Image (cartoon, rainbow, N blue to C red):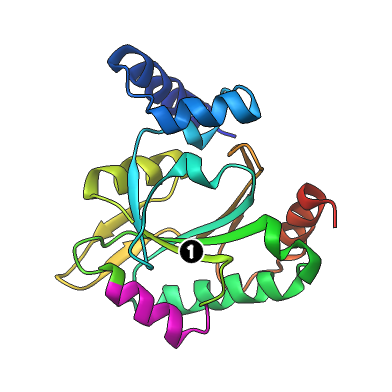
Amino acid sequence: MSYSIRNLFSVVMLSALVLGCQSKSEQDVVKEKGPLPEMSIYHLPSTWTTHRGDSIELGDLRGDVLVLVMIYTQCQAACPRLVADMRNIESKVSPIAKGNVKYVLVSIDPEQDTPERMAAFALENKMTEDHWLFLRGTPGTVRDFANVLAVKYKQISPVDFSHSNIISVFDQNGVLVHQMEGLNVNNEKTVNAITELVGQ
């Protein structure tokens, strides 16, 4: 993991402590599952809306392995390939592990990607099972999250973005353990990383 990402995590964690941002639910999670590792994404104080219309915090995902990518639903270039890569990875992971892995797609275009639009996208792409999760944040929380993942994106027209093509794997405590960059690349290492984490 790069030095810059470590620095960003440290800044986020310090800010959360100084401003008293830890919510009751985060405290409950710590009580139940122990302290979070220093590099956990669950230190990020942010709230997200799912494609099912639920409001969640990142810490609500603790306990599952996360396979995560940042896309936007109107994308006609790289995103369809990234979605296909996510589905291909999911198909190679043991069915026994499905209850312990979440496949998360975070929108970089929260203005357009409403829960209704994300739900329609999930249906179009046959990603309606419980282990598929689409998240919509605010422009600020999305930008902060992208920075942590070293994902770069930029709006280049009213409906188009240029963006990095990175799929990330997080362990059960939200620590980044693996990244796969590119489109239609060999995903054997990614599948192996998930399999090792879930023990299946």
Amino acid carrying mark 1 in the image: Leu
Callout 1: SS: strand
Q: Nearer the viewer, residue 37 or 69?
A: 37
Residue 128: percent from left, percent from top: 51, 77
Placement of 48 over or under 105, stated as above or below: above
* Residue positioned most to the left: 158
Q: Is residue 26 above or below residue 86?
A: above
Q: Could one spot residue 140 in this view of the protein?
A: yes
Compared with residue 141, is residue 181 higher up or lower down, i.e. above or below?
Answer: below
Which region is colored magenta?
116-127
Instruction: Please indicate whether residue 175 sits to the left or right of residue 81 in the image.
Output: right
Q: Residue furthest right?
A: 200
Residue at 23% x, 49% y is: 139
Q: Residue at x 33, y 44 (%)?
A: 47
Alpha-carbon neighbours of circle 1 within 10 Å: few (<14), some, or many (≥20)? many
**Tag 1 residue:** 133
Image quarter hosting the C terminus? bottom right
Q: Main secondary structure of the magenta part?
A: helix
Most foreground residue, 137 or 147: 137
Q: Residue at x 59, y 65 (%)?
A: 131
Q: Position of residue 24 (x, y in %)?
A: 40, 28
Q: Nearer the viewer, residue 37 or 82?
A: 37
**In the drawing, does residue 20 fall left or right of residue 151?**
left
